[in-house]
Amino acid sequence: QQPVQSPQAVILREGEDAVINCSSSKALYSVHWYRQKHGEAPVFLMILLKGGEQKGHEKISASFNEKKQQSSLYLTASQLSYSGTYFCGTRIRSSNTGKLIFGQGTTLQVKP
Amino acid sequence: NAGVTQTPKFQVLKTGQSMTLQCAQDMNHEYMSWYRQDPGMGLRLIHYSVGAGITDQGEVPNGYNVSRSTTEDFPLRLLSAAPSQTSVYFCASSPQDQGFYGYTFGSGTRLTVV
């Protein structure tokens, strides 16, 4: 039931772009994205509900393909502050909507 | 407005001891959850609640109990601590899902069982 994230780790130079993927074997109700800095708590970035919906947060955006049960997080023109671990969280259609299951995380390192 | 408050921040237990991790939120959120975080394992759901008096099991509930007598508080009880329960524990809360709200996390409790 745990969603699968790829890649597990990414190393970028400032200004480069990155894509993080999240896929589930279950029909999804929604997908959340969070970022966690080392030693800190995860912080909510955005939530996606409908098939094909895309949202943005600064230069970070995401899409949700409801048919494929996949979501992708796009980081454009990365900054040093984007470094951290990114988690997707999924709610499946048949479950209580209070149950949010996270992927294993993708570690992003942005170098000068 | 304190958000989600977890206590203690650090704790060392001996194998077999019991303890309660406290979680309180002052945002009147209906949804609350407990996660544990281990290296390479991401955030794993232990128990969750959709309102006062309603709790359910997550992915890794064994060895843990919860109760939700008020909207504000959601304590996590370790019944008989084991070294495998050494982890960082996060409590999180959210308004009832309208499709627009994410979870707010507490700062975490780092637990070591020796």
Image: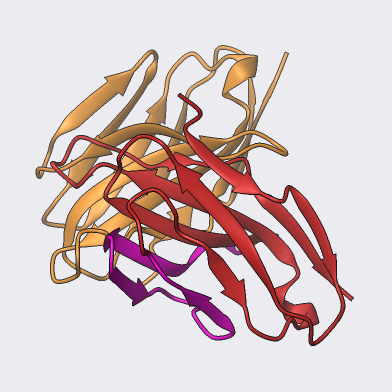
The chief SS type of the magenta part is: strand
Image spot of residue B7 (x, y percent): 66, 49
Write down the quadrant of residue A103 in the picture: bottom left
The magenta segment: B41-68
Q: Is residue A43 above or below residue B62?
A: above
Image spot of residue B94 (x, y percent): 32, 43
Q: Is residue B13 above or below residue A68?
A: below
Write down the quadrant of residue B89 in the picture: bottom right
Nearer to me, B52 or A4:
B52
Quadrant of the frame with the C terminus of chain B? bottom right
Residue drawn at (43%, 18%) of the image: A76
Nearer to me, B14 or A58:
B14
Outermost residue on the front side: it is B69
Image spot of residue A49 (x, y percent): 15, 43
Q: Which colour scheme is used?
A: by chain
Whether residue A53 sits left or right of residue B66 in the image: it is: left
Image spot of residue B26 (x, y percent): 41, 36
Q: How many labels does the image show?
A: 0
Q: Which chain is red?
A: B
* Colour applied to chain A: orange
Nearer to me, B62 or B4:
B4
Q: Does B10 appear in magenta?
A: no
Residue drawn at (10%, 43%) of the image: A50
> Residue B29, can we see it?
yes
Q: Does B65 appear in magenta?
A: yes
Residue drawn at (49%, 80%) of the image: B61
Residue drawn at (28%, 21%) of the image: A56
Write down the quadrant of residue A13 in the picture: top right
Quadrant of the frame with the N terminus of chain B? top left
Q: In this view, does B2 lie above or below A93?
A: above
Q: In this view, does B79 lie above or below A21?
A: below
